[in-house]
Image: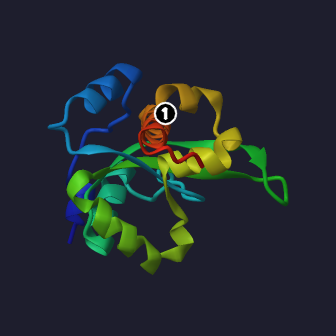
Amino acid sequence: MNNPAEDTKAPIRIFNADTWKSILKDREIPFKQLMVFRAMVVKEWDTSNPIHKFEQWAKDKMGIEIRYVTEFKCRHAKAGGTRRNDVVFTIHEDDKSKFAVERFKFPSLQASWWEDYLENEGDNVPTNIKTKLPNAWKKWRREEEQGRQELAKETGFNE
C-alpha cells in the first residue's frame, strides 16, 4: 500500500524576505516562530516529497504542526572536517508551548528557537541565510532593554 504522505504533492515553501515581512506583520498567519534542528538533512530523505514527509513526521511523532523553511551547511567544519547540516522551520503558534516540552523526548534533534540559535551559533550561519530570515527578535530585545531602563528610571532602581 502506498504511503499517503508520499502521494501528497505539498508545495515547497521557501520564503523570501518580502514573504517574511508579510508574515511578521500579519498576526493572522500562525507560523511565525522560527526554529532550528541541528544535524538534520531533510532534502535527502528517501521520498519523492521529503519536505512534506518532514512536516508530517513532526505531526505524527510530536503532535505539532510545522513548516519547512530551508536548510544549510554550517560555515565551520567540526571534528573530522565535516560541516553540519541544519534545518530551519516554523512552528504553529498554538504548538509552541507543546513543542517546548515534546522536544525533550527527542534529545538527538538538538532543537532551538532561532533567536537562541543565532545568539549561540550565529557565526556558523552562512550570510545568505542570515539576510533571508527575519531578525525581529533583535527589535524585541531593544524594546525589552528600553523597557528595563524606563522602569529603572521610574522606580529609582538601577541594576
Q: Examine the rendering and report whether any part of residue 26 can be seen.
A: yes
Residue located beneath label 1 in the image: 142
Task: Pick out the residue farthest to the bottom.
Answer: 105
Q: Is residue 40 left or right of residue 27?
A: right
Name the image quarter holding residue 31.
top left
SS for tag 1? helix
User: Residue at the spot x=27%, y=25% of the render?
Assistant: 22
- Give the amino acid type for the residue marked by disc 1 in the picture: Arg
> Quick one: label 1, few (<14), some, or many (20+) residues within 10 Å?
few
Q: Is residue 149 above or below residue 22?
A: below
Query: Residue 134, image x and y in percent?
Result: 44, 31
Q: Examine the rendering and report whether any part of residue 48 can be seen.
A: no
Query: Residue 122, image x and y in percent?
Result: 65, 41
Closest to the observer: 42 or 88? Answer: 88
Q: Is residue 11 left or right of residue 36?
A: left
Task: Pick out the residue farthest to the right.
Answer: 80
Task: Pick out the residue farthest to the front.
Answer: 156
Query: Residue 116, image x and y in percent?
Result: 54, 51
Q: Is residue 45 above or below residue 16?
A: below
Query: Residue 61, image x and y in percent?
Result: 32, 74
